[in-house]
């Protein structure tokens, strides 16, 4: 009994076998299970014109994210001390210490715009407001809907 390979079969099988070996030996990308969680966007609230239900949803979203130390962002715009102001709040995990909040405040417009930043240690949700306390700039910030102002600061 003689053993002969079919030249047509060999011509197609050899490249296929080599491709299979190359695939098995090639490094593969890691699974995405260890990817960082998505940051939650709680909203962009205009405190001088948003509806109370829209503001409540945004405030609740950020407060809940802070309570669970989930990544979240909340942007609010309005007036503070008669100036157009934008507040940006981002949760920041503190290793072994829960969360804090990065607060960035932009005041004014154009070339007269100023920006301040600090960290706050807690977020409290009251009936009509979201209050950030323990801020490094020594001022608590309370966001609330109003036609006259968007936030108040107290020392």
Image: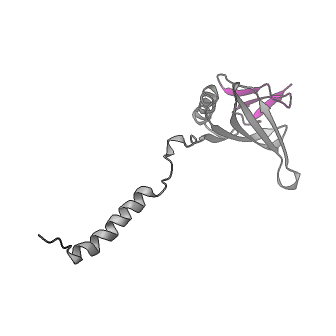
Residue 119 located left or right of residue 36: right
The residue range painted magenta reads 127-155
* Quadrant of the image containing the N terminus: bottom left
Q: Magenta segment: does it hold 135?
A: yes
Image point 51% across, 48% down: which residue? 30
Asked which quadrant contains residue 44, the reply is top right
- Quarter of the image where one finds residue 106: top right
Is residue 104 rendered magenta in the image? no
x%, y% of residue 125? 66, 24
Can residue 150 be spotted in the picture? no
Quadrant assignment, res 89? top right
Nearer-the-camera pick, 50 or 60: 60
Name above or below for residue 104 compared with residue 155. Answer: below
Measured from the top left, where is residue 152 in percent x and y? Answer: 79, 30
Residue at the spot 40% in from the left edge and 56% down from the top edge: 24
Q: Is residue 84 above or below residue 59?
A: below
Q: Position of residue 42 (x, y in %)?
A: 61, 38
Q: Is residue 112 above or below residue 138?
A: below
Choose between 52 and 58: the one closer to the eye.
58
Q: Residue, x 76% and y 33% (percent of image)?
A: 151
Image quadrant occupied by the C terminus:
top right
């Amino acid at each position: 009994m003689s053993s002969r390979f079919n030249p047509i079969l060999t011509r197609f099988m050899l490249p296929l076998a080599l491709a299979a070996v190359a695939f098995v030996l090639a490094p593969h990308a890691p699974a995405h299970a260890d990817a960082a969680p998505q940051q939650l966007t709680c909203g962009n609230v205009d405190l001088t014109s948003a509806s109370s239900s829209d503001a409540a949803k945004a405030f609740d979203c950020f407060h809940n994210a802070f309570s669970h130390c989930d990544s979240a962002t909340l942007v609010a715009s309005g007036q503070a001390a008669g100036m157009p102001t934008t507040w940006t709040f981002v949760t920041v995990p503190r290793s072994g210490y829960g969360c804090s909040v990065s607060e960035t405040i932009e005041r004014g417009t154009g070339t007269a715009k100023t920006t301040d930043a600090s960290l706050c240690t807690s977020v409290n949700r009251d009936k009509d407001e979201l209050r950030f306390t323990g801020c490094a700039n020594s001022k608590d910030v309370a966001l609330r809907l109003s036609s006259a102002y968007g936030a108040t600061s107290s020392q």
